[in-house]
Amino acid sequence: MNPHQDPTQPGQRPHPPPPTQARGRRRRATLLAAAVDLLTQGGFAAVTHRAVAHHANLPLAATTYYFTSRDQLLAEAFAQLVETELTTTRTWITDHGLTALTDQIATADRTRQLGLWELYVHAGRDPVLQQIARRWADGCIRIIADTLHLPETDTRVRLLYTTLSTLWLEQVVEQRPLDEARTLLTLAVKTAENTLPPP
């Protein structure tokens, strides 16, 4: 074909996009959703190429085509969990306030939360997961800073995030009394607010 010819002229067909492109995106999204489901249901060990393919009702070859390694599959599932969690957290704080976050944690899907924290621990041994874990921490810090109208570098923001993370982990893993966590978080928030300069 002459490269200078206009493909839209009569008698010449324009080249359509590859017919498998949209289908490929859908398949990949389905596989990733299956990986997230397995991660939240059975933890780190539950996510394998074979298990993901079975859960997604797709052939094993599809999983290995779109995700060349289990590490890539886990990393993308972790990233998706982190983004979902950050969006949920920001929405909850906007609607209910920072001190009510313990109630959101207590009512959230516990298996999903366990999957998130399990990957967070694994991130200590995996540089790729570590970067995703940092996005989670940095995102939480940004939400707290925005709520308190403080810069993200303010030590009160970091201290409040550390308190919240500890209470979050205790609630998900140890399932300590919710009243205790609510009291501690309320105290931490009030301490941060009481040290804010006057407007």
Image (spheres, grey):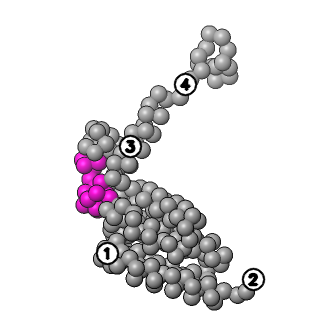
Instruction: Tell me which residue sits at (31%, 62%) in the image.
Output: 111
Residue 88 position, x and y percent, is 50, 61
Mark 2 packing: few (<14 Cα in 10 Å), some, or many (20+)? few
Q: Report which residue position mark 2 lands on.
A: 199
| Viewer can see residue 65 | yes
Label 4 sits on what residue type? Pro
Mark 2 or mark 3, earlier in chain: 3
Read off the magenta span. Answer: 38-52
Dots 4, 2 in contact, CB < 8 A: no
Q: Report which residue position mark 4 lands on.
A: 16
| Viewer can see residue 79 | no
Dots 4, 3 in contact, CB < 8 A: no
Mark 3 packing: few (<14 Cα in 10 Å), some, or many (20+)? some
Identify the mark at residue 30; answer none if there is no mark.
Answer: 3
Mark 1 packing: few (<14 Cα in 10 Å), some, or many (20+)? few
Dots 4, 1 in contact, CB < 8 A: no
Image quadrant containing the N terminus = top right
**Magenta span main SS:** helix
Q: Is residue 15 magenta?
A: no
Residue 68 position, x and y percent, is 35, 49
Structural distance between the alpha carbons of marks 3 and 1: 32 Å
